[in-house]
Amino acid sequence: MTIDHRAVTIYDVARHAHVSVATVSRVTNGQKVREDLAKRVLASVAILGFRPNRTAQRLRLTTSHLWALIVPDFENSFFTRLARGLEQICLPRNTCVFVGSSDDDPQKERHYLDVAIAERVGGVVIAPASDATDLSGLTEAGIPVVIVDRSLPDNRYDTVLTDNFAGGALAANYLTSAGYRKTVCIAGSPNPTSEKRLEGFAATVNKTGLLDIAKVKYGNNRIEGGYTAIRQLLEEGIVFDSVFVTNNLMTIGVIKALDDWAALSRDNIGFVGFDLNEIPLLAGKRIASIDQNPHEMGRLAGERIIFQQQQSDAAAELFEFAPKLGGLSWKL
């Protein structure tokens, strides 16, 4: 078989060697990797006749006109607004952003990280798919990285968050002050964000002693997750007068399920969730929203990328935005 060497790419080498694109990039750039992996990559390079474009590599090392934004779900308006904030920093600097949606799938996330490393992007802004997300390849490649929305346990990277514990506390205080006494919680799949929101909610409920948490159910941070969770609670016969949801899309599912399965009681149930102001169809007299500021979070993440480009040895910092209780303009 004749191989067109001009058509061979770094992705072909990665597939042939059964390694990540990031590993190929490190080997061809003279960076340290495990000996067995290096041998496989070099063998594939020889077999395929891969010829790295050294001119392009030098350009990538000295320019930063492409950044990566990797998020769990780009259909979620929170991340769309965050992207807008990041774009506001990029555009005046003649920089573009490519967006990858990991769907909370570590393999998809790894793919986008590999692409970012292979393309020598000027910076990566990421909402990690899990606590196990490995960003060391970015660090080794000298690529600035900022974490948004979800933290990682090691605190090695600039991180931009909402104070999620405070957000949960705001939700509990709202339901209590509105006179609700028995609530259920629909929390997202376990990650630091949903866990902190639930923790803040539960701590405030325990402190006031006026609101009882009848049950906690977990969903997948999408509409069907909220729908399934509340339907299961109804089937179990759980009695509640309010619902706290840690994610905006699941709130849509919760309300749709109540419309389908408990239409008569739906208007008597109170709801509080996050970022509901971006979903006008949810407007109603018993809905409140814990509002974040994703646009400013995106802007700050972009500013931190630029700062890291200029100060590569700067210590990592944590930035937390205060949430606000909103949505009460809907209360009739």
Image: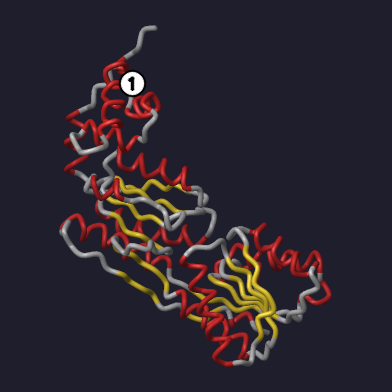
- From this view, report whether residue 48 is shown above or below residue 311: above
Look at the image and tell me in which quarter the N terminus lies.
Answer: top left
Give amino acid for label 1: Val
Residue drawn at the location 62% of the way across and 61% of the way down? 219
Q: Where is residue 88 drawn, in percent x and y?
A: 33, 59
Q: Where is residue 319 drawn, in percent x and y?
A: 32, 71
Q: Residue furthest top?
A: 1
* Side (left or right) of 116 relative to 312: right
Where residue 125 sits, quadrant-wise, is bottom left
Please name the residue that numbered disc 1 is placed on: 8
* Side (left or right) of 177 relative to 38: right
- From this view, report whether residue 111 is shown above or below residue 266: above
Quick one: SS at disc 1? loop
Residue drawn at the location 80% of the way across and 77% of the way down? 265
Residue drawn at the location 38% of the way across and 46% of the way down? 98
Q: Where is residue 156 drawn, in percent x and y?
A: 28, 61
Residue drawn at the location 49% of the way across and 63% of the way down? 191
Look at the image and tell me in which quarter the C terminus lies.
Answer: bottom right
